[in-house]
Image: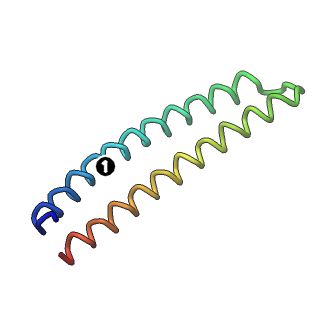
């Protein structure tokens, strides 16, 4: 069985990796926002149903990325709580 210090160190390392993923998710969110703006601009006035669907999917992806960021941040906070109680 791992010692308390080993568990704390493992949690710290896991949180570092999770924090890196938050940064990557922020970059993904920014890129999707740019894509959404471009798509909206170039498809403005189009009557095709696919255009609305495509824009909806991008908006859905933005929401999923934001939800993922929040979930990772919550996981970090929860694991920090575990480490603090050790």
Q: Quadrant of the C terminus?
A: bottom left
Residue 19 rendering spot, x and y as whole percentages: 31, 49
Q: Residue furthest top?
A: 42
Between 34 and 82, which is closer to the camera in this rendering?
82
Asked which secondary structure carries label 1, the reply is helix
Q: Is residue 75 left or right of residue 66?
A: left
Q: Residue at coordinates 85% horizontally, 25% vertically from top-left?
A: 46
Q: Residue at coordinates 60% horizontally, 49% vertically from top-left?
A: 63
Q: Is residue 65 left or right of residue 80?
A: right
Residue 33 rendering spot, x and y as whole percentages: 56, 36
Residue 70 vs 36, above or below: the answer is below
Q: Is residue 86 left or right of residue 20?
A: left
Question: For the image shown, how many numbered marks are present on the structure?
Answer: 1
Mark 1, other Cα within 10 Å: few <14 / some 14–19 / many ≥20: some
Residue 4 rendering spot, x and y as whole percentages: 12, 69
Between 56 and 64, which is closer to the camera in this rendering?
64
Q: Quadrant of the N terminus?
A: bottom left
Q: Is residue 12 left or right of residue 5?
A: right
Q: Pointer 1: what residue?
A: 19
Residue 27 rendering spot, x and y as whole percentages: 42, 36
């Amino acid at each position: 069985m791992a010692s308390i210090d080993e568990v704390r160190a493992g949690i710290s390392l896991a949180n570092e990796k999770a924090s890196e993923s938050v940064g990557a998710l922020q970059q993904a969110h920014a890129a999707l926002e740019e894509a959404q703006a471009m798509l909206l601009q170039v498809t403005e006035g189009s009557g095709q149903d696919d255009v609305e669907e495509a824009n909806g999917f991008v908006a859905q992806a933005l929401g999923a990325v934001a939800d993922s960021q929040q979930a990772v941040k919550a996981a970090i906070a929860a694991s920090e709580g575990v480490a603090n109680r050790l």
